[in-house]
Image: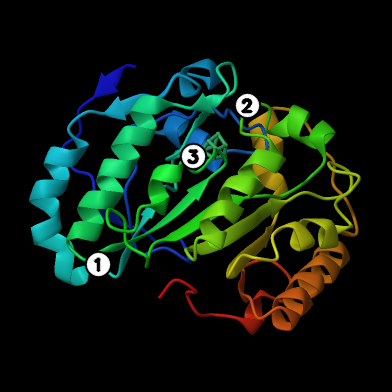
Amino acid sequence: MECIARKSLLYKTKVEYGDWTINHIVGCKHGCRFPCYAMMMARKFGWIKDYEDWRKPKLVKNALDLLEKEIPKYKNQIDFVHLCFMTDPFMYDAEKDRIIPDIKDLTLKIIERLNRDGIRVTILTKGIYPDDLLNTQRFSKNNEYGITLVSLNNNFKEQYEPYSSSYETRVESLKKLAKAGLKTWVSIEPYPTPELDPDAAQIEKILEKIHFAKKIIFGKLNYNKLVNYCGRNSHNWKNSQEFYEAIARKVIDFCNTNNIQYHIKAGTPLSNEDHRNIFK
Ligand code: SF4
């Protein structure tokens, strides 16, 4: 796998449920077309040329050396570190049907290194969680493991998230961690409209599948981003406000009934009910 060197690694993020974060890979083999904010930013900053380039991830080869220097410097300011907002830490290789080994190894070493200094980690993937994380001698029980899941419809997946892990495998790998007593969460955002996913009105099906998770984040799709990303005029679904309000209400009711913490993202209907960072 191609590698690059960086001058720094840890940084404080302004993402609403974030604190500090690390992106130890540039690019993502998942190549989601629904829209990938990270890819749009990487292109804007000149880190990648195009979509094909984005799908050829590059490892930050000096990530662990940088951590050794940065942990003592920032430790007292850090509440938790999120992996990752700009790539995927347990990236799946659809051609080989496995987690990419080099990425998995580096991600595990980074989590282990942060945990050794008492820094907990939140993780988000559209890949698969490895069983290594069940080793609570090596990894802190305070880490919080999350997946993104915005649909269970395989036609939607084929079109918008073609190279990520299957929904079934993704959920099962998270459930395995939950069954072992580890903390799990699910990001349901950006959530599609029924125009993009005909099953979108039935969010109950997704919620039932992930009932074991301790936290849920829900957010609407930003149309402008989708239009820019696809490079063509997208739809403009007139009833989106009502639709997202109804779906957000279902998420809130489900979470309240099942004792799950939730966060409705800013800009999504009903988000004003909840201002706290659910990872703090
Ligand atoms: S998994 Fe995340 S970072 Fe990777 S392409 Fe999809 S949206 Fe982008």
**Split into 4 quadrants, where in the image is the C terminus?**
bottom left
Q: Secondary structure at mark 1?
A: loop
Quadrant of residue 247 within the rendered picture:
bottom right
Which numbered tag is attached to residue 38?
3
Within 8 Å: ligand 1 and the Cβ of disc 2?
Answer: no
Q: Is residue 76 visible?
A: yes
Ligand 1 sits in quadrant = top right
Q: Position of residue 254 (x, y in %)?
A: 76, 74
Q: Is residue 270 above or below residue 166?
A: below
Position of the N terminus by quadrant? top left
Q: Is label 2 in a helix, a strand or a loop? A: loop
* Separation (CA) of disc 1 from disc 3: 23 Å
Dot 2: within a 10 Å radius of its alpha carbon, few (fewer than 14), some, or many (20 or more) residues? many
At a point 83% along the width and 50% down the height, the residue shown is 193
Residue 78, labelled with which disc? 1
For the residue marked with disc 3, what is the amino acid? Ala
Q: What residue is at 47 percent from the left and 17 percent from the top?
A: 53
**Residue 184, horizontal then vertical, whole percent:** 53, 62
N-terminal of the pair, mark 1 or mark 2, is: 1
With 48 as the anchor, is 241 left or right in this view? right
Q: Which-is-in-front pick, marks 1 and 3?
A: 1
Comparing labels 2 and 3, the label whose residue is closer to the camera: 2
| Foreground of the two, 1 or 141 | 141
> Disc 3 beta carbon < 8 A from ligand 1?
yes
Seen in the image, is 196 located left or right of residue 135? Answer: right
Residue 265 seen from this side: no
Mark 1 vs 2: CB contact within 8 A? no
Which residue type does callout 2 highlight?
A: Tyr
Residue named by callout 2: 163
Crowdedness near tag 3: few (<14), some (14–19) or many (≥20) residues, C-alpha within 10 Å: some
Q: Earlier in the sequence, mark 1 or mark 3?
A: 3
